[in-house]
Amino acid sequence: MSTSEMNPGRGETCDVCIVGAGIVGLNALYVASRYLSSDQKVILVDRHPRAGGMWVDAYPYVRLHQPHPLFTAGDIKWTIDKERSYLATKSEILEHFQHCMRVIGQRVRVEEYFGFDYRSHEETSGGVRITCAGPDGTPLVITATKLIKAFGTNVVPLEPLQVSSNRLRSVSPNYCDVRADDMAASDAPVWIIGGGKTAMDTAAALITASPGREVNLVAGPGTVFINRDRILPRGARRWWGGGMPNRLFIDIARHFDGTNEPEVQDWLLRTAGLAVTPHPNNFFAGLLSESEQRTIREGLNTVVMDHLEDAVDRNGSVELRFRSGNSTETTAGSWLVNCTGYLLHTSTPYEPYVSPSGSVLSIQTRSATFGFLSFAGYFLTHLMFRDKLRELPLYAVDGDDLRTKTATAAAVTYGALTLHLYNLSLIYDALGPSVFLRCGLDFDRWYPMHRRLGDTAHFVRTHHHDQDHNRRTLDTLRDRFDARCGPIV
């Protein structure tokens, strides 16, 4: 007898069901609450024990990579008493998610089902039937008029790397605080595997907590970061200096034609980029400050521009073997920290971002419509409630498929920014400026109003011309990599 036969579970009805309570889901919930009345009901389902999505599982020393006011649901303001450039901690971010839930709960009735896993859904004549399972396997069947699957990037914690050596201690940031416990008590060398944001966080945490300790980096092709001091300057420079983020994204898309990511990378590094490693080839649109770059560069003992293949015991020490065929030795008892990134660690089936009926909105990487999926939670939910989700010919890109077909992440990320701007252009024409003004995710909100108005005027003046270029770029990426890219048929 199956679990469902032994325990038939319970049934619920609602106007909107949202699966996922991370930054994507909370933005969808915020927008839905603007259209629903106070007597209507939203059911929020998430596999985590609380709202927060990936931040619930995030490693303990993680910090927000952007000023905290720019990371929110809709235009809900933060309540912490910190300088506006402050980079929030994990606990502060999770508390802000709770605050957003309280604010939204004042406008619409929200029932929360935390610890519940989404299993499946089917569209019926009466709406959408969603099947979930509770922590003990008890089924939960929800009948809703609309379903929003706010899966986002579907991040799961990183596991330690599996290597042949028995003399290494292999860990991952999700299960080992590098500033504390056994790691802090040890003075053995540390090898950080990865060159992205997680690796930079880990290096900075280790170097700051244990000055003088041997910390090494195996950085793969290396990563280009956007200079946070350049696009989000602190103090009075907001009023007259810096380069506004949206203008930078527009310039990146104008430089990119779908084939020339090395040239765009060189231009970005010269104008608004930073790198810890020499000759970086990857770009994930991550942020890094000049002081963080300096701290990490000065604290690293060795930087290896290669990919780790294995670690084997040899003559009392450990040999690290790399993809290039090179190798290096480290002492027994050294630490290996897996910071290889969170993308492509799960297998997500392909699904269009909108169902044929328009009753189901699915926000994930297999049919991505935005470079930053939090924007999809905000703007696509507006389109859904205005019955424009099916009619607008947004481009959707199978990001997971594209990543498997490219040598580096650069083409994917530049394509994602191009996609982001192309669809924003279509949505601006469909929804008008008022919806944009309430989007608290906009990086340009860092700047005073007079500068934002100038940048908005530039976008309004040029976005139709850029739309043509961006569509051609996306078509080129589709043809170049034989990837799913274009409007949903």
Image: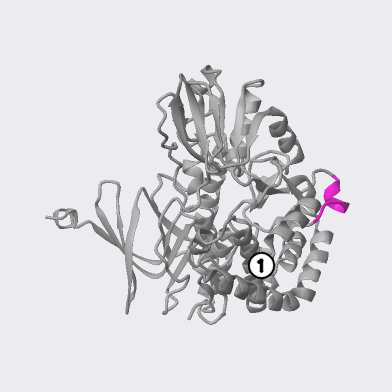
Question: In the image, what residue occupies the spot 48% across and 81% down?
Answer: 489
Residue at 56% of width from left, 18% of height from top? 187
Does residue 151 belong to the magenta stretch? no
Report which quarter residue 453 is drawn in.
bottom right
Extent of the magenta region: 236-243
Query: Residue 467 location, x and y as percent?
Result: 69, 76
Colour scheme of the rendered structure: one colour
Q: Determine the residue positioned at 47% across, 48% down.
A: 51
Q: Does residue 125 appear to the left or right of 303 in the view shown?
A: left
In the rendered view, tell whether residue 12 sits above or below residue 325. below
Residue 295 in which image quadrant: top right
Residue lying furthest left: 1
- Give, as a three-letter code, the residue at label 1: Thr
Of residues 211 and 426, the one drawn nearer to the viewer in this rendering: 211
Mark 1 secondary-structure assignment: loop
Which image quarter holds the N terminus?
Answer: bottom left
Label 1 neighbourhood size at 10 Å, few (<14), some (14-19), many (20+)?
few
Where's residue 64, x and y in %? 62, 43
The residue that label 1 is drawn on is 259
Q: Residue furthest right?
A: 240
- Can see residue 106? no
* Residue 380: image location, x then y, percent: 55, 69
Residue 239 visible, this angle:
yes
Callout count = 1
